[in-house]
Amino acid sequence: MQRVAQTAIEAGKAYARLAGGDAAAGGDGAIGLLRRALLYLPAHDHRKVVKASTLDVDLICLDCEDAVAEARKPDARQAIPDILSSTNFGRSEVAVRINPVDTPHAWHDLEAVLGASTRPHTIVVPKVDTPEQMEWLYDAVQTLSPDSNTKPLHLITQVESAVGLHFLHDICQVGKDRGSAEDRRIIHDGLILGGDDFAASIRARRTPSNRELLLARQQTIVAAARFGLTAIDIVNIHYKQGLDLLEQEASEGAEMGFDGKQVIHPVQVPIVQAAYHPTPQQIDYARRLVDAFNAHSDAGTGAFEFEGTMVDMPTVRQHQQVLWMDNHLQAAAAQK
Ligand SMILES: CCC(=O)SCCNC(=O)CCNC(=O)[C@H](O)C(C)(C)COP(=O)(O)OP(=O)(O)OC[C@H]1O[C@@H](n2cnc3c(N)ncnc32)[C@H](O)[C@@H]1OP(=O)(O)O
Ligand SMILES: O=CC(=O)O
Ligand SMILES: [Mg+2]
């Protein structure tokens, strides 16, 4: 007899096992891996830091990379320790996006992050193109953070070029191999598709349909699923108009299998988070479907008719993910 989780919490654990990642079961306790919206802001812009701290957003990313002009890179880096120790970001996961590892800034950015008295939950590393760059990153963290018993730092890498997409599985493999049970200084648990840099890399023209990014979006989702990582979708830079298009794009990303989306302005946050939030109808349907599956399973039936459609295990697994998301949303709401 094959029974599946009836409660959202059980579903969450089951989904984490399916995804192959213990962190997905809420390994960090407080933050889990709810990453519906990742809000970027330039780290040296104090007003935006203050504004971000007032928002109900899953992930806040203090950017030292492309939001910061070359001449202001030191200002952004130097602001990080003070922001981290003096700002209450509420329930939000807090990340710092360092500069790419093949720039002279990366080492200094890492020094600032790892040396801070309050560390962020997560580092985002842009433009990871090769497994060698991933090895460099792990070596750098080991050197700058010699104590292997420190609280694990989550790592999200960005795929942003043709080369990065080509080597994506090898890059993730380095994260899997180096993040052993003995050394959990960093846990690679997310991928971001940097759609705008990627478009530039393949000489694409950006369109509202995003069809030029379809392959990269799907390959990012597939690699993330294979390695048990969260997958975070492209940015929509049109924050002043076309918010209906943002809603459509976010819903499409959720349907495709992304766990969340990058955003660049506060106005985009609630739209994107709502699009990744299962509706009460979807949650109710998922619960009833899982219950019906278990009843049929007890009676020795695998495939059965449910409200006019055929249901068997793949459909059940899809709906367990709805219950997993609902579980995490409830936990997040309880922390507000
Ligand atoms: C596409 C490739 C990528 O790499 S995307 C990631 C890199 N880019 C970024 O991080 C850009 C982030 N966004 C921004 O810097 C701003 O939103 C830009 C686009 C410059 C617009 O800023 P601004 O002219 O101040 O907007 P506004 O007057 O409409 O702002 C209203 C209030 O909201 C604030 N705000 C704005 N953006 C953010 C943000 N990203 N995070 C937090 N707060 C933000 C503004 O400061 C303003 O609040 P206040 O009036 O200052 O209190
Ligand atoms: O970093 C984000 C991108 O679109 O590029
Ligand atoms: Mg980018």
Image (cartoon, rainbow, N blue to C red):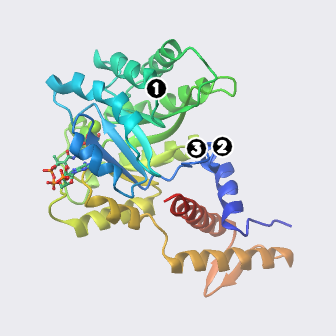
Position of 223 relative to 85 (above/below) = below
SS type, badge 3: loop
Q: Mark 1 points at which residue?
A: 117
State which tag comes first along the sequence, 1 or 2. Answer: 2
Query: Does mark 2's beta carbon lie closer than 8 Å to ligand 2?
Result: no
**Pointer 3 or 1: first along the chain:** 1
Q: Nearer the viewer, residue 82 or 257?
A: 82
What percent of the width, then of the height, locates residue 325?
55, 62
Label 1 sits on a secondary structure element that is loop
The percent position of residue 171, horizontal first and vertical second, equals 48, 29
Q: Residue at horizontal 52%, vertical 78%? A: 280
Three-letter residue code for mark 2? Asp
The residue indicated by pointer 2 is 22
Label 3, on which residue?
228
Label 2 secondary element? loop
The amino acid marked with disc number 1 is: Ser
